Image: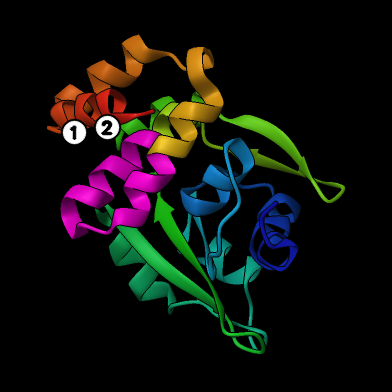
């Protein structure tokens, strides 16, 4: 089970403000597979105006980048990203702006509703979580992403849409990595 503080601090405000979002990364991986430690939450958010994000996460409890910084990140069709910090706890949210990214659009359309500690949250489909973990592994080489992929594959098994997953992985240059990880599973 993910840390409820992360949900309370970063996901509940998104719900209250009416954002279209999905939790991804380690928190999503924990919901679909097995728990592990994480000190942050990753979310993909559709943001219409920079002020919306800042009003959902206002100071003094939060540090949200200035409106002009959020606007610059929103202008990126792909890979817009900001960090939001909860200053009293030092917990963090990595906020990926949906922008025009077709992968985000695909995943947001397939997001799933979860109950976490009595709070309803939206979570990225497991195929998206696996794909992003593969991409992050390729970028940084952290073995935690491979462990998460293995756990997701084991826990979700045949419930996964392997046709979509394999196609999306191949399009993004991580198809061989997915095949290798699937072949090495016990």
Q: Nearer the viewer, residue 135 or 142?
A: 142
* Residue pictured at 37% horizontal, 14% vertical: 162
**In the displayed structure, would residue 72 be above or below residue 132?**
below
Q: Is residue 84 visible?
A: yes
Picture coordinates of residue 132, whole percent (x, y) = 33, 42
Picture coordinates of residue 111, whole percent (x, y) = 56, 30
For residue 44, side relative to residue 117 (left or right): left
Graded by Cα atoms within 10 Å as few (under 14), some (14 to 19) or many (20 or more), the crowding at tag 2 reads some
* Residue pictured at 54% horizontal, 78% vertical: 85
**In the displayed structure, would residue 66 be above or below residue 76?**
below
Q: Nearer the viewer, residue 29 or 182?
A: 182
- In the image, the segment drawn in magenta is 130-149
Q: Is residue 99 visible?
A: no
Q: State if disc 2 and disc 1 touch (CB < 8 Å).
A: yes
**Magenta region includes residue 135:** yes
Residue named by callout 2: 181
Residue named by callout 1: 177
For residue 47, side relative to residue 72 (left or right): right
* Residue pictured at 72% horizontal, 68% vertical: 5
**Magenta region includes residue 102:** no
For residue 57, side relative to residue 134 (left or right): right
Q: Quadrant of the C terminus?
A: top left
Graded by Cα atoms within 10 Å as few (under 14), some (14 to 19) or many (20 or more), the crowding at tag 1 reads some
Q: Quadrant of residue 96?
A: bottom left
User: Please, what is the dominant secondary structure of the magenta stretch?
Assistant: helix
Picture coordinates of residue 175, whole percent (x, y) = 18, 26
């Amino acid at each position: 089970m993910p840390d409820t503080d992360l949900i309370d601090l970063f996901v509940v405000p998104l719900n209250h403000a009416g954002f279209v979002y999905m939790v991804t990364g380690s928190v999503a991986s924990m919901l679909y597979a097995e728990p592990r430690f994480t000190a942050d939450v990753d979310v993909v958010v559709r943001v219409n105006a920079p002020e919306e994000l800042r009003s959902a996460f206002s100071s003094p409890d939060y540090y949200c980048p200035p409106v002009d910084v959020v606007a610059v990140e929103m202008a990126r069709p792909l890979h817009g990203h900001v960090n939001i910090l909860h200053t009293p706890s030092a917990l963090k949210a990595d906020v990926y702006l949906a922008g025009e990214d077709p992968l985000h659009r695909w995943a947001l359309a397939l997001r799933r509703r979860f109950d976490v500690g009595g709070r309803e949250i939206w979570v990225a489909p497991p195929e998206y979580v696996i794909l992003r973990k593969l991409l992050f592994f390729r970028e940084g080489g952290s073995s935690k992403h491979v462990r998460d992929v293995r756990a997701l594959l084991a826990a979700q098994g045949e419930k996964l849409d392997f046709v979509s997953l394999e196609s999306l992985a191949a399009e993004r240059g991580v198809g061989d990595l997915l095949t290798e990880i699937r072949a090495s599973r016990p």
